[in-house]
Protein backbone atom coordinates (compact mmCIF):
# COMPACT_ATOMS: atom_id res chain seq x y z
CA UNK A 1 0.00 0.00 0.00
CA UNK A 2 1.31 3.42 -1.00
CA UNK A 3 1.76 5.96 1.71
CA UNK A 4 1.44 9.77 1.40
CA UNK A 5 4.22 11.81 2.79
CA UNK A 6 3.56 15.52 3.54
CA UNK A 7 6.71 17.29 2.48
CA UNK A 8 5.19 20.82 3.15
CA UNK A 9 6.16 22.10 6.52
CA UNK A 10 3.37 23.11 8.99
CA UNK A 11 4.54 26.71 8.93
CA UNK A 12 3.94 26.79 5.19
CA UNK A 13 0.35 25.58 5.66
CA UNK A 14 -0.35 28.37 8.21
CA UNK A 15 1.11 30.93 5.81
CA UNK A 16 -1.15 29.77 2.99
CA UNK A 17 -4.25 30.00 5.23
CA UNK A 18 -3.28 33.49 6.29
CA UNK A 19 -2.95 34.61 2.66
CA UNK A 20 -6.36 33.22 1.84
CA UNK A 21 -7.93 35.01 4.82
CA UNK A 22 -6.19 38.27 3.84
CA UNK A 23 -7.46 38.01 0.30
CA UNK A 24 -10.98 37.36 1.61
CA UNK A 25 -10.80 40.42 3.87
CA UNK A 26 -9.58 42.57 0.97
CA UNK A 27 -12.42 41.31 -1.19
CA UNK A 28 -14.98 41.95 1.55
CA UNK A 29 -13.65 45.49 2.07
CA UNK A 30 -13.87 46.17 -1.67
CA UNK A 31 -17.50 44.92 -1.73
CA UNK A 32 -18.45 47.04 1.32
CA UNK A 33 -16.73 50.11 -0.09
CA UNK A 34 -18.51 49.65 -3.41
CA UNK A 35 -21.86 49.26 -1.63
CA UNK A 36 -21.22 52.34 0.51
CA UNK A 37 -20.32 54.31 -2.57
CA UNK A 38 -23.53 53.24 -4.28
CA UNK A 39 -25.61 54.15 -1.21
CA UNK A 40 -23.89 57.53 -1.04
CA UNK A 41 -24.60 58.14 -4.70
CA UNK A 42 -28.25 57.22 -4.16
CA UNK A 43 -28.54 59.59 -1.17
CA UNK A 44 -26.86 62.35 -3.12
CA UNK A 45 -29.25 61.88 -6.03
CA UNK A 46 -32.26 61.91 -3.65
CA UNK A 47 -30.98 65.02 -1.86
CA UNK A 48 -30.40 66.73 -5.19
CA UNK A 49 -33.88 65.78 -6.38
CA UNK A 50 -35.49 66.99 -3.14
CA UNK A 51 -33.63 70.27 -3.37
CA UNK A 52 -34.82 70.72 -6.92
CA UNK A 53 -38.39 69.83 -5.87
CA UNK A 54 -38.23 72.28 -2.94
CA UNK A 55 -36.90 75.00 -5.21
CA UNK A 56 -39.75 74.38 -7.66
CA UNK A 57 -42.35 74.47 -4.86
CA UNK A 58 -40.86 77.69 -3.48
CA UNK A 59 -41.32 79.24 -6.89
CA UNK A 60 -44.92 78.02 -6.98
CA UNK A 61 -45.60 79.39 -3.50
CA UNK A 62 -44.15 82.76 -4.48
CA UNK A 63 -46.45 82.86 -7.51
CA UNK A 64 -49.46 81.93 -5.36
CA UNK A 65 -48.47 84.49 -2.74
CA UNK A 66 -48.31 87.15 -5.43
CA UNK A 67 -51.75 86.14 -6.72
CA UNK A 68 -53.23 86.25 -3.22
CA UNK A 69 -51.63 89.63 -2.57
CA UNK A 70 -53.06 90.96 -5.81
CA UNK A 71 -56.57 89.60 -4.91
CA UNK A 72 -58.65 92.70 -4.24
CA UNK A 73 -61.36 90.92 -2.15
CA UNK A 74 -58.92 89.21 0.19
CA UNK A 75 -60.12 91.05 3.31
CA UNK A 76 -63.74 90.08 2.62
CA UNK A 77 -62.73 86.47 2.04
CA UNK A 78 -60.82 86.31 5.33
CA UNK A 79 -63.77 87.86 7.15
CA UNK A 80 -66.15 85.25 5.72
CA UNK A 81 -63.73 82.46 6.64
CA UNK A 82 -63.51 83.71 10.21
CA UNK A 83 -67.28 83.94 10.43
CA UNK A 84 -67.68 80.38 9.14
CA UNK A 85 -65.27 79.21 11.80
CA UNK A 86 -67.36 80.95 14.46
CA UNK A 87 -70.69 79.50 13.35
CA UNK A 88 -70.75 76.96 16.19
CA UNK A 89 -70.12 79.55 18.89
CA UNK A 90 -72.51 82.04 17.29
CA UNK A 91 -75.25 79.41 17.14
CA UNK A 92 -74.62 78.44 20.75
CA UNK A 93 -75.12 82.06 21.87
CA UNK A 94 -78.14 82.66 19.63
CA UNK A 95 -81.35 83.60 21.42
CA UNK A 96 -84.87 82.76 20.20
CA UNK A 97 -86.99 85.89 20.47
CA UNK A 98 -90.06 84.05 19.16
CA UNK A 99 -90.32 82.16 22.45
CA UNK A 100 -91.47 85.41 24.02
CA UNK A 101 -95.05 84.58 23.03
CA UNK A 102 -95.03 81.21 24.76
CA UNK A 103 -93.47 82.69 27.90
CA UNK A 104 -96.03 85.50 28.04
CA UNK A 105 -98.84 82.97 27.67
CA UNK A 106 -97.52 81.08 30.67
CA UNK A 107 -96.94 83.98 33.07
CA UNK A 108 -99.77 86.44 32.28
CA UNK A 109 -103.08 85.41 33.90
CA UNK A 110 -106.36 85.63 32.01
CA UNK A 111 -109.91 84.99 33.11
CA UNK A 112 -111.78 86.66 35.98
CA UNK A 113 -108.55 88.09 37.39
CA UNK A 114 -106.40 89.28 34.52
CA UNK A 115 -103.43 91.49 33.72
CA UNK A 116 -103.00 93.65 30.63
CA UNK A 117 -99.61 94.83 29.40
CA UNK A 118 -99.31 98.38 28.06
CA UNK A 119 -95.55 98.45 27.37
CA UNK A 120 -93.08 95.60 27.04
CA UNK A 121 -89.29 95.60 26.62
CA UNK A 122 -87.50 92.27 26.04
CA UNK A 123 -83.75 92.05 26.67
CA UNK A 124 -82.06 88.83 25.54
CA UNK A 125 -78.57 90.24 25.10
CA UNK A 126 -77.43 89.70 28.70
CA UNK A 127 -76.70 86.39 30.40
CA UNK A 128 -80.02 86.68 32.26
CA UNK A 129 -82.95 87.47 29.88
CA UNK A 130 -85.43 90.00 31.27
CA UNK A 131 -88.92 91.30 30.51
CA UNK A 132 -89.55 94.87 31.64
CA UNK A 133 -93.14 95.99 31.32
CA UNK A 134 -95.87 98.35 32.50
CA UNK A 135 -99.17 96.63 33.14
CA UNK A 136 -102.49 96.89 34.94
CA UNK A 137 -104.24 94.33 37.11
CA UNK A 138 -108.01 93.93 37.11
CA UNK A 139 -109.95 91.71 39.49
CA UNK A 140 -112.98 91.51 37.15
CA UNK A 141 -115.39 92.55 39.88
CA UNK A 142 -116.17 95.82 41.67
CA UNK A 143 -114.20 97.84 42.48
CA UNK A 144 -111.95 96.13 39.86
CA UNK A 145 -108.83 97.34 41.62
CA UNK A 146 -107.36 94.71 43.89
CA UNK A 147 -103.76 94.31 45.00
CA UNK A 148 -104.38 90.58 45.56
CA UNK A 149 -104.32 90.08 41.77
CA UNK A 150 -100.80 91.50 41.63
CA UNK A 151 -99.76 89.61 44.75
CA UNK A 152 -101.00 86.33 43.24
CA UNK A 153 -99.15 87.15 40.03
CA UNK A 154 -95.89 87.61 41.94
CA UNK A 155 -96.24 84.43 43.97
CA UNK A 156 -97.08 82.32 40.91
CA UNK A 157 -93.59 82.94 39.50
CA UNK A 158 -92.02 80.39 41.85
CA UNK A 159 -94.24 77.67 40.36
CA UNK A 160 -93.47 78.42 36.71
CA UNK A 161 -91.44 75.79 34.88
CA UNK A 162 -90.06 75.15 31.41
CA UNK A 163 -89.29 72.00 29.48
CA UNK A 164 -87.23 71.08 26.42
CA UNK A 165 -85.72 67.96 24.89
CA UNK A 166 -85.82 65.81 21.76
CA UNK A 167 -88.36 63.66 19.95
CA UNK A 168 -87.17 60.12 19.18
CA UNK A 169 -88.48 57.29 17.02
CA UNK A 170 -89.28 53.80 18.29
CA UNK A 171 -85.59 52.87 18.03
CA UNK A 172 -84.56 55.77 20.25
CA UNK A 173 -82.91 57.76 17.42
CA UNK A 174 -83.31 61.54 17.55
CA UNK A 175 -85.70 63.08 15.04
CA UNK A 176 -84.42 66.41 13.61
CA UNK A 177 -86.19 69.41 15.12
CA UNK A 178 -87.26 70.72 11.70
CA UNK A 179 -89.24 67.52 11.15
CA UNK A 180 -91.60 68.21 14.05
CA UNK A 181 -94.78 70.35 14.00
CA UNK A 182 -95.85 71.48 17.48
CA UNK A 183 -98.44 74.18 16.76
CA UNK A 184 -101.43 74.61 14.47
CA UNK A 185 -102.03 77.29 11.87
CA UNK A 186 -103.32 79.70 14.53
CA UNK A 187 -100.07 79.34 16.48
CA UNK A 188 -101.57 77.35 19.36
CA UNK A 189 -99.55 74.47 20.74
CA UNK A 190 -101.05 71.09 19.86
CA UNK A 191 -102.78 69.79 22.95
CA UNK A 192 -105.51 67.33 23.77
CA UNK A 193 -107.74 68.37 26.66
CA UNK A 194 -107.54 64.89 28.21
CA UNK A 195 -104.27 63.36 27.01
CA UNK A 196 -101.96 66.37 27.05
CA UNK A 197 -99.42 67.72 24.56
CA UNK A 198 -98.45 66.10 21.27
CA UNK A 199 -96.67 66.91 18.01
CA UNK A 200 -96.67 65.72 14.41
CA UNK A 201 -93.65 64.03 12.86
CA UNK A 202 -93.18 64.63 9.12
CA UNK A 203 -92.06 61.07 8.59
CA UNK A 204 -91.84 61.36 4.80
CA UNK A 205 -89.78 64.57 4.87
CA UNK A 206 -86.20 64.60 3.62
CA UNK A 207 -83.87 63.44 6.37
CA UNK A 208 -86.77 63.07 8.82
CA UNK A 209 -86.72 59.30 9.28
CA UNK A 210 -83.43 58.12 10.91
CA UNK A 211 -84.20 54.44 10.25
CA UNK A 212 -84.84 55.06 6.54
CA UNK A 213 -81.62 57.07 6.24
CA UNK A 214 -79.59 54.24 7.82
CA UNK A 215 -81.17 51.72 5.46
CA UNK A 216 -80.36 53.90 2.45
CA UNK A 217 -76.71 54.16 3.54
CA UNK A 218 -76.49 50.36 3.84
CA UNK A 219 -77.90 49.94 0.33
CA UNK A 220 -75.38 52.41 -1.06
CA UNK A 221 -72.55 50.56 0.67
CA UNK A 222 -73.74 47.30 -0.91
CA UNK A 223 -73.44 48.90 -4.35
CA UNK A 224 -77.09 49.61 -4.95
CA UNK A 225 -77.51 52.52 -7.36
CA UNK A 226 -80.16 55.16 -6.71
CA UNK A 227 -82.69 55.42 -9.50
CA UNK A 228 -83.26 58.76 -11.15
CA UNK A 229 -86.90 57.98 -11.94
CA UNK A 230 -89.32 60.06 -9.89
CA UNK A 231 -91.58 57.75 -7.92
CA UNK A 232 -95.12 58.78 -6.95
CA UNK A 233 -95.50 59.85 -3.32
CA UNK A 234 -96.70 56.93 -1.18
CA UNK A 235 -100.06 57.10 0.52
CA UNK A 236 -100.51 57.17 4.28
CA UNK A 237 -101.53 53.51 4.23
CA UNK A 238 -98.45 52.50 2.23
CA UNK A 239 -96.19 54.44 4.60
CA UNK A 240 -97.84 52.76 7.58
CA UNK A 241 -97.06 49.32 6.16
CA UNK A 242 -93.53 50.33 5.19
CA UNK A 243 -92.50 52.07 8.41
CA UNK A 244 -94.60 50.29 11.02
CA UNK A 245 -96.03 53.61 12.31
CA UNK A 246 -99.60 54.84 12.26
CA UNK A 247 -99.24 57.41 9.47
CA UNK A 248 -102.08 59.86 8.90
CA UNK A 249 -102.87 62.89 6.74
CA UNK A 250 -102.65 66.35 8.35
CA UNK A 251 -102.90 69.55 6.33
CA UNK A 252 -101.86 67.67 3.19
CA UNK A 253 -98.77 66.10 4.83
CA UNK A 254 -97.94 62.57 5.94
CA UNK A 255 -97.45 62.67 9.70
CA UNK A 256 -97.15 60.48 12.76
CA UNK A 257 -98.60 61.74 16.03
CA UNK A 258 -96.07 61.63 18.86
CA UNK A 259 -97.26 62.26 22.39
CA UNK A 260 -95.15 64.69 24.37
CA UNK A 261 -97.18 63.86 27.46
CA UNK A 262 -96.73 60.14 28.36
CA UNK A 263 -99.83 58.00 27.99
CA UNK A 264 -99.36 56.10 31.22
CA UNK A 265 -102.47 53.92 30.99
CA UNK A 266 -101.75 52.80 27.43
CA UNK A 267 -97.98 52.46 27.66
CA UNK A 268 -97.41 50.80 31.02
CA UNK A 269 -97.06 47.02 30.94
CA UNK A 270 -95.85 44.96 33.86
CA UNK A 271 -94.14 42.28 31.77
CA UNK A 272 -93.84 43.59 28.21
CA UNK A 273 -92.61 41.49 25.32
CA UNK A 274 -89.19 42.21 23.85
CA UNK A 275 -90.32 44.51 21.03
CA UNK A 276 -93.61 45.66 22.55
CA UNK A 277 -94.16 49.39 23.19
CA UNK A 278 -94.01 49.98 26.92
CA UNK A 279 -93.22 52.36 29.76
CA UNK A 280 -91.61 51.19 32.99
CA UNK A 281 -92.17 52.41 36.52
CA UNK A 282 -88.78 54.13 36.28
CA UNK A 283 -90.09 56.29 33.45
CA UNK A 284 -88.17 54.52 30.68
CA UNK A 285 -90.11 54.36 27.40
CA UNK A 286 -89.31 51.70 24.78
CA UNK A 287 -90.30 50.77 21.24
CA UNK A 288 -92.59 53.75 20.67
CA UNK A 289 -91.90 57.27 19.37
CA UNK A 290 -91.94 59.70 22.29
CA UNK A 291 -90.41 62.85 23.76
CA UNK A 292 -87.20 62.67 25.78
CA UNK A 293 -87.53 65.52 28.26
CA UNK A 294 -84.44 67.22 29.67
CA UNK A 295 -86.40 68.58 32.65
CA UNK A 296 -89.37 66.40 33.56
CA UNK A 297 -88.92 63.04 35.28
CA UNK A 298 -91.64 60.38 35.45
CA UNK A 299 -91.95 57.53 37.93
CA UNK A 300 -94.67 55.13 38.99
CA UNK A 301 -95.51 53.33 42.20
CA UNK A 302 -97.49 50.12 42.31
CA UNK A 303 -100.07 49.86 45.09
CA UNK A 304 -102.45 47.09 46.09
CA UNK A 305 -105.85 47.77 47.59
CA UNK A 306 -106.19 45.89 50.87
CA UNK A 307 -109.88 45.17 50.37
CA UNK A 308 -110.18 44.40 46.67
CA UNK A 309 -106.59 43.20 46.23
CA UNK A 310 -106.55 45.11 42.97
CA UNK A 311 -103.29 46.70 41.86
CA UNK A 312 -103.13 50.32 40.74
CA UNK A 313 -100.28 52.53 39.54
CA UNK A 314 -99.72 56.04 40.88
CA UNK A 315 -97.59 58.16 38.57
CA UNK A 316 -95.59 61.17 39.69
CA UNK A 317 -94.23 64.01 37.55
CA UNK A 318 -91.34 66.12 38.85
CA UNK A 319 -89.58 69.15 37.42
CA UNK A 320 -87.28 70.53 40.11
CA UNK A 321 -84.40 71.86 38.02
CA UNK A 322 -85.99 73.87 35.19
CA UNK A 323 -87.52 76.91 36.87
CA UNK A 324 -88.76 79.51 34.41
CA UNK A 325 -88.10 82.37 36.85
CA UNK A 326 -85.20 81.47 39.18
CA UNK A 327 -85.27 82.76 42.74
CA UNK A 328 -83.43 86.00 43.42
CA UNK A 329 -79.91 85.63 44.79
CA UNK A 330 -78.34 87.25 47.84
CA UNK A 331 -77.71 90.45 45.90
CA UNK A 332 -81.39 90.69 45.02
CA UNK A 333 -80.98 90.01 41.31
CA UNK A 334 -83.30 87.63 39.51
CA UNK A 335 -86.90 86.66 40.13
CA UNK A 336 -89.62 89.27 39.78
CA UNK A 337 -89.47 92.85 40.99
CA UNK A 338 -92.39 95.25 41.24
CA UNK A 339 -90.98 98.74 40.92
CA UNK A 340 -94.12 100.77 41.66
CA UNK A 341 -97.91 100.52 41.67
CA UNK A 342 -100.75 103.04 41.70
CA UNK A 343 -104.40 103.46 40.84
CA UNK A 344 -105.59 104.40 37.37
CA UNK A 345 -108.51 104.12 34.97
CA UNK A 346 -108.49 101.94 31.87
CA UNK A 347 -110.08 102.70 28.49
CA UNK A 348 -113.49 101.65 29.89
CA UNK A 349 -113.12 104.08 32.80
CA UNK A 350 -112.82 101.18 35.26
CA UNK A 351 -110.47 101.38 38.21
CA UNK A 352 -107.37 99.25 37.77
CA UNK A 353 -104.06 98.80 39.58
CA UNK A 354 -101.14 99.99 37.48
CA UNK A 355 -97.68 98.59 38.11
CA UNK A 356 -94.20 98.26 36.59
CA UNK A 357 -92.29 95.00 36.82
CA UNK A 358 -89.05 93.33 35.78
CA UNK A 359 -88.91 89.52 35.45
CA UNK A 360 -85.61 87.69 35.05
CA UNK A 361 -85.80 84.31 33.33
CA UNK A 362 -83.49 81.31 33.15
CA UNK A 363 -81.06 81.79 30.20
CA UNK A 364 -81.74 78.25 28.92
CA UNK A 365 -85.31 79.26 28.03
CA UNK A 366 -84.22 81.34 25.02
CA UNK A 367 -81.16 79.28 24.03
CA UNK A 368 -81.29 78.28 20.35
CA UNK A 369 -79.71 74.87 21.02
CA UNK A 370 -82.50 73.86 23.43
CA UNK A 371 -85.14 72.53 21.06
CA UNK A 372 -88.89 72.13 21.56
CA UNK A 373 -88.94 74.63 24.42
CA UNK A 374 -92.24 75.20 26.20
CA UNK A 375 -93.14 77.33 29.23
CA UNK A 376 -95.43 75.65 31.75
CA UNK A 377 -97.90 77.32 34.11
CA UNK A 378 -98.90 75.82 37.46
CA UNK A 379 -101.27 72.89 36.95
CA UNK A 380 -104.92 73.83 36.82
CA UNK A 381 -104.48 77.56 36.35
CA UNK A 382 -104.90 77.80 32.58
CA UNK A 383 -103.97 76.17 29.33
CA UNK A 384 -100.62 77.16 27.88
CA UNK A 385 -100.70 78.42 24.32
CA UNK A 386 -98.64 80.62 22.05
CA UNK A 387 -101.55 81.58 19.82
CA UNK A 388 -100.96 85.07 18.50
CA UNK A 389 -104.67 85.82 18.57
CA UNK A 390 -104.83 85.04 22.28
CA UNK A 391 -101.64 87.00 22.92
CA UNK A 392 -103.39 90.12 21.65
CA UNK A 393 -105.82 90.08 24.57
CA UNK A 394 -102.91 90.43 26.99
CA UNK A 395 -102.10 93.93 25.73
CA UNK A 396 -104.10 97.08 26.39
CA UNK A 397 -103.66 100.83 26.41
CA UNK A 398 -101.94 102.15 29.52
CA UNK A 399 -104.38 103.16 32.24
CA UNK A 400 -104.79 106.90 32.73
CA UNK A 401 -103.65 108.73 35.86
CA UNK A 402 -106.16 109.60 38.54
CA UNK A 403 -107.61 113.07 37.96
CA UNK A 404 -107.72 115.55 40.81
CA UNK A 405 -111.52 115.54 40.89
CA UNK A 406 -111.73 111.72 40.63
CA UNK A 407 -112.36 110.96 44.31
CA UNK A 408 -113.05 107.24 43.78
CA UNK A 409 -109.78 106.74 41.94
CA UNK A 410 -107.76 108.63 44.53
CA UNK A 411 -109.29 107.21 47.69
CA UNK A 412 -110.23 103.63 46.76
CA UNK A 413 -107.96 101.20 48.66
CA UNK A 414 -106.29 98.40 46.77
CA UNK A 415 -108.31 95.43 47.97
CA UNK A 416 -107.30 93.76 51.23
CA UNK A 417 -103.84 95.29 51.23
CA UNK A 418 -104.55 98.52 53.11
CA UNK A 419 -100.89 99.40 53.36
CA UNK A 420 -100.63 99.70 49.58
CA UNK A 421 -101.97 103.23 49.12
CA UNK A 422 -103.00 104.70 45.82
CA UNK A 423 -100.26 107.28 45.53
CA UNK A 424 -97.81 105.43 43.33
CA UNK A 425 -95.59 104.35 46.24
CA UNK A 426 -93.03 101.57 45.88
CA UNK A 427 -93.98 98.06 46.86
Image (cartoon, rainbow, N blue to C red):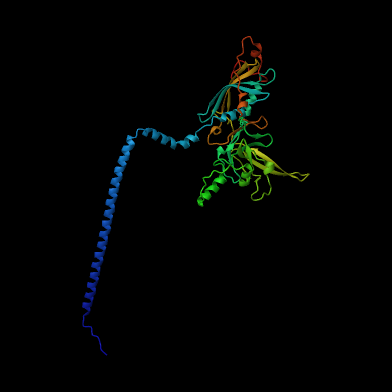
Q: Where is residue 418 in the image (x, y as percent from the top left)?
A: 66, 18
Query: Residue at left 24%, top 67%?
Result: 27
Q: Residue furthest bottom?
A: 1
Q: Position of residue 247 (x, y in %)?
A: 63, 42
Query: Residue at left 65%, top 25%?
Result: 110
The foreground one among 177 and 366 is: 177
Q: Residue furthest top?
A: 405
Residue 140 to residue 217: above or below: above
Q: Position of residue 80 (x, y in %)?
A: 42, 34
The foreground one among 148 and 197 is: 197
Residue 412 to residue 159: above or below: above
Q: Dividing the picture into quarters, in which one does residue 267 lie? A: top right
Query: Residue at left 63%, top 27%?
Result: 155
The foreground one among 224 and 246 is: 224
The foreground one among 95 and 15 is: 95
Q: Dividing the picture into quarters, in which one does residue 266 lie? A: top right
Q: Can residue 260 be seen in this view?
A: no
- Quadrant location, the N terminus: bottom left
Q: Dividing the picture into quarters, in which one does residue 104 lie? A: top right
Amino acid sequence: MAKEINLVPDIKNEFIKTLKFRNFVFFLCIVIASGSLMVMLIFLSIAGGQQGFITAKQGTLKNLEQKITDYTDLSDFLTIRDQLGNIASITGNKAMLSRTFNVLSAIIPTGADYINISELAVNLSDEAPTFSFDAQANSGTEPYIDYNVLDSFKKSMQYMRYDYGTYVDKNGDDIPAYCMIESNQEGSILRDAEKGYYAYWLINGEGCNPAAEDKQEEENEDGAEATENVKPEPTASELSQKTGYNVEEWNGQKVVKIWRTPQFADWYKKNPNENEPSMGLNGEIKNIPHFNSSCIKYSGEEKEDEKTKETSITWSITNDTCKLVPDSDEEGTGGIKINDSSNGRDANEQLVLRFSAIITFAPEVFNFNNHHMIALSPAGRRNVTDSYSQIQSMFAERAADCQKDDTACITTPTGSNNEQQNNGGEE
